[in-house]
């Protein structure tokens, strides 16, 4: 009976003719647990794995209220749009919401799905109101952020167990696309009042080809990588809001570019999301605020201008590409100034995919489906060939100063600062690509 009900609901409400095996397993587990008392589930699905339907569909079938908790507003808006598209009645609760309107809608019984954030849920008025109602599902999505962003950054999540005890949901569900051993253990301690059942899929995304670029001029590399139209739309991930804004300005003359970070006014973020979602050629310069769950299926490439701290964060962000199942690309810029502990995963010519999975505690159970280490096709860094060619044109012709002066006068380098050129030359000297003898430069012949 449950299987037929799930199949009909998937097709009639969500337009899904056939659920994927893992989706079906998760949904069946949740639906079968209705009315059996409290239970917990931690589900790990890769980006693009269709996890939203794993809690949206049971929410439609549940007798009581479903509360879905997200870490950022963009995901709340994205989830609300998804539910509206399918004609599913719901209510959004954030700091901007009209609380009286919200309470009346839920009290009327018209609304049984609530999308919110942890801070709004902690309101004494809201907790008191909801605790008097039957809560079927309490869902936490993108739960890895509780740990990866730092527990002190969102201390409200430390109250998740208290919320669960007050609301007494039939089931507590947690979803994420990436999960390592430590995060899994810590989430069990923070979110669940009982040990959760874990349903896990492979975090590998075989449709993404991983590249590394030994970058000397990262802005120029971004331009070179994203100029081909088949690599757009694209997301360029950076570590700071300021860098997102500066990079947006620098890339805008070459292709339509948008900025996205948590410090922008909500209406600006919403406008950027809507434009990017519909675009076929935009580039979005973003912080981690765009690194989760926002469902733009047509992204063809992701560039990591800055390398994240953890493999789980990298996989989450690179996984924005190719959510439609088509081939996509991930480019990581390796700069000499990179401080991330993850940089060693890209530091030589070995298999990137194998290293990333290993850092997640996984073993690659088949051959690599695409990375430059396995294919031997490495993406050249912008400017390197030109510097090497000039340095090696006549052995011992240049000193470091005369090479710098010569490069600054070349038309190709006119849009690059003298400081950047000097640092690029110094990097090539430190790495032994350019040799120094008695103050003069030469390039060792191959």
Image: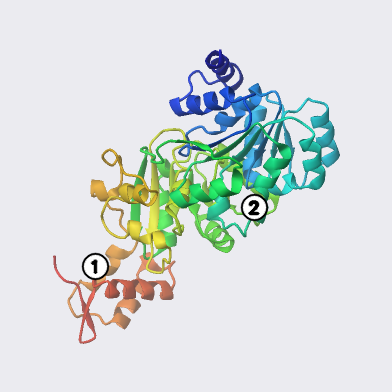
Q: How many marks?
A: 2
Instruction: State the scheme by which the image is colored.
Output: rainbow
* Pointer 2 with pointer 1, Cβ within 8 A: no
Q: Residue at x 53, y 54 (%)?
A: 148
Can you see residue 257?
A: no
Q: Residue at x 27, y 63 (%)?
A: 385
Counting residues from the start of the chain, the first of labels 2 and 1 encountered is 2
Q: Callout 1: 10 Å neighbours few (<14), some, many (20+)?
A: few
Q: Position of residue 33 (x, y in %)?
A: 59, 25
Drawn side of residue 105 relative to residue 270, left or right: right
| Image quadrant containing the N terminus | top right
Q: Secondary structure at mark 2?
A: helix
Drawn side of residue 131 relative to residue 28, left or right: right
Q: Position of residue 259 (x, y in %)?
A: 58, 53
Q: Is 422 located above or below residue 289 in the figure?
A: below
| Image quadrant containing the C terminus | bottom left
Q: Is 19 located above or below residue 302 in the figure?
A: above
Q: Callout 2: 10 Å neighbours few (<14), some, many (20+)?
A: some
Q: Secondary structure at mark 1?
A: helix
User: Which numbered circle lies on residue 389?
Assistant: 1
Which is more foreground, mark 2 or mark 1? 2
Q: Position of residue 286 (x, y in %)?
A: 54, 53
Q: Residue at x 59, y 18 (%)?
A: 9
Which is nearer the eye, 13 or 433?
Answer: 13
Q: Position of residue 439 (x, y in %)?
A: 24, 86
Please tell me in which quadrant of the rendered image residue 36 appears: top right
Q: Is 377 located above or below residue 84 in the figure?
A: below
Disc 2 versus disc 1: distance between alpha carbons?
57 Å
Circle 2 is placed at which residue position? Answer: 158
Which is nearer the eye, 7 or 253?
Answer: 7
């Amino acid at each position: 009976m449950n299987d037929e009900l799930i199949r009909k609901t998937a097709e009639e409400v969500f337009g899904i003719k056939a659920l994927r095996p893992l989706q079906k397993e998760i949904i069946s587990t949740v639906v079968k647990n209705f009315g059996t008392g409290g239970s917990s589930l931690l589900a790990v699905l890769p980006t693009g794995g269709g996890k939203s339907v794993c809690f949206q569909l049971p929410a439609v079938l549940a007798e009581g209220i479903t509360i879905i908790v997200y870490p950022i507003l963009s995901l709340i808006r994205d989830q609300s749009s998804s539910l509206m598209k399918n004609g599913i009645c719901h209510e959004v609760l954030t700091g901007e919401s009209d609380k009286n309107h919200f309470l009346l809608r839920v009290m009327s019984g018209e609304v049984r799905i609530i999308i919110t954030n942890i801070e709004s849920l902690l309101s004494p008025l809201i907790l008191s109101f909801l605790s008097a109602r039957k809560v079927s599902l309490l869902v936490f999505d993108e739960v890895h952020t509780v740990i990866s962003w730092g527990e002190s950054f969102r201390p409200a999540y430390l109250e998740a167990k208290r919320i669960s005890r007050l609301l007494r949901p039939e089931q507590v569900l947690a979803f994420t696309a990436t999960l390592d051993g430590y995060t899994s253990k810590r989430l069990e301690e923070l979110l669940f009042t009982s040990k959760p059942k874990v349903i896990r899929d492979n975090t590998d995304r075989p449709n993404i080809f991983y590249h590394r670029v030994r970058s000397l001029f990262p802005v120029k590399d971004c331009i070179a990588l994203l100029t081909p139209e088949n690599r757009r739309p694209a997301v360029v991930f950076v570590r700071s809001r300021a860098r997102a804004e500066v990079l947006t300005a620098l890339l805008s003359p070459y292709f339509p570019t948008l900025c996205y970070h948590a410090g922008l006014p909500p209406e600006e973020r919403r406008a950027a999301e809507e434009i990017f979602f519909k675009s076929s050629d935009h580039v979005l310069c973003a912080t981690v605020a765009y690194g989760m769950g926002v469902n733009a299926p047509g992204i063809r490439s992701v560039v990591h201008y800055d390398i994240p701290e953890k493999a789980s964060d990298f996989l989450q962000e690179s996984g924005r590409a190719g959510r439609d199942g088509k081939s996509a690309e991930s480019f990581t810029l390796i700069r000499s100034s990179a401080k991330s502990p993850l940089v060693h995963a890209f530091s030589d010519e070995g298999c990137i995919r194998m290293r990333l999975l290993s850092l997640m505690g996984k073993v690659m159970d088949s051959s690599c489906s695409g990375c430059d280490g396995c294919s031997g096709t490495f993406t050249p860094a912008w400017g390197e060939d030109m510097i090497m060619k000039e340095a090696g044109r006549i052995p011992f012709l240049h000193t470091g100063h005369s090479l710098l002066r010569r490069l600054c006068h070349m038309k190709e380098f006119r849009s690059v600062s003298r400081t950047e050129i000097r640092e690029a030359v110094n990097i090539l000297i430190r790495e032994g690509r350019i040799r120094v003898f008695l103050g003069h430069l030469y390039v060792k012949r191959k």
